Image (cartoon, rainbow, N blue to C red):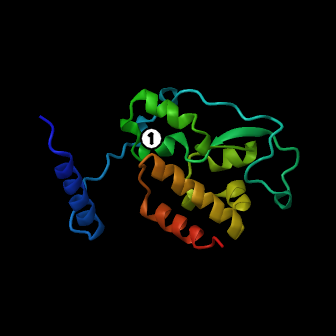
Amino acid sequence: MKPPLLAVSLAAGILAMLVSVGAYHPPAPTVCSADTYDRSEWGDYPKADPRAAPRWTQPADNVLSPTITQDHHVALKDAHTAGGCNWPETKKDQFSSDPANLNPTTKSFNSSKGSRTPDQLIGTAAGIIDTPAEQCAYADQHRAVKGKYALTMTTSERRTVREWLALCQ
């Protein structure tokens, strides 16, 4: 027998209130080791149009003759370690091909970014995401994708995303 809808709604409301005031801490999602990541479990994704303009590279970045490739904004390996390790294969495939998480980028940006989160960007990627407007947009997409899939963020990652979102005008 199903519980009455009012009781379910009331219980959900009370739980939400307890979480919001810090009186209840839901169990943390399982975070998996990068050692258990297997790219073959994450399905295929659409390739980037080689004529597409790269998402993050601007003329001032001085990237000559860029080769365009598809980048997962939230890398598959990052998604795996942030909770996606527990997903069924169909959800991993959905994540892998979600347009909200895909950007045409230069090969040099994609290689430099790898599976790094915003707080870990180095080299070419850090040099390209270097203006307040780019950091704002990058953090906004990162937060949206991680939120959509209920993926965790490290403390450092969350701090960087907050700092970059504060740059938004």
Residue, x 68% and y 70% (percent of image)?
132
Determine which quarter of the picture holds residue 136: bottom right
Quarter the N terminus occupies: top left
Query: Of helix, strand and loop, which one carries label 1?
Result: helix
Residue, x 26% and y 65% (percent of image)?
17
Image-based side of 67 in relation to 9, left or right? right
Image-based side of 63 in relation to 102, left or right? right
In this rendering, is residue 40 above or below 129? above
> Which amino acid, mark 1?
His
Q: Which residue is mark 1?
A: 80
Determine which quarter of the picture holds residue 134: bottom right
Q: Residue 133 or 114: which is nearer the viewer?
A: 133
| Label 1, residues with CA under 10 Å away: few <14, some 14-19, many ≥20 | many
Residue, x 55% and y 47% (percent of image)?
74
* Residue 49: x %, y % from top left: 77, 34
Residue, x 43% and y 49% (percent of image)?
151
In this rendering, is residue 63 above or below 92? below
Furthest residue to the left? 1
Determine which quarter of the picture holds residue 122: bottom right
* Residue 15: x %, y % from top left: 22, 59
* Residue 13: x %, y % from top left: 25, 59
Q: Residue 107 or 50: which is nearer the viewer?
A: 50
In this rendering, is residue 41 above or below 5? above
* Residue 47: x %, y % from top left: 69, 31
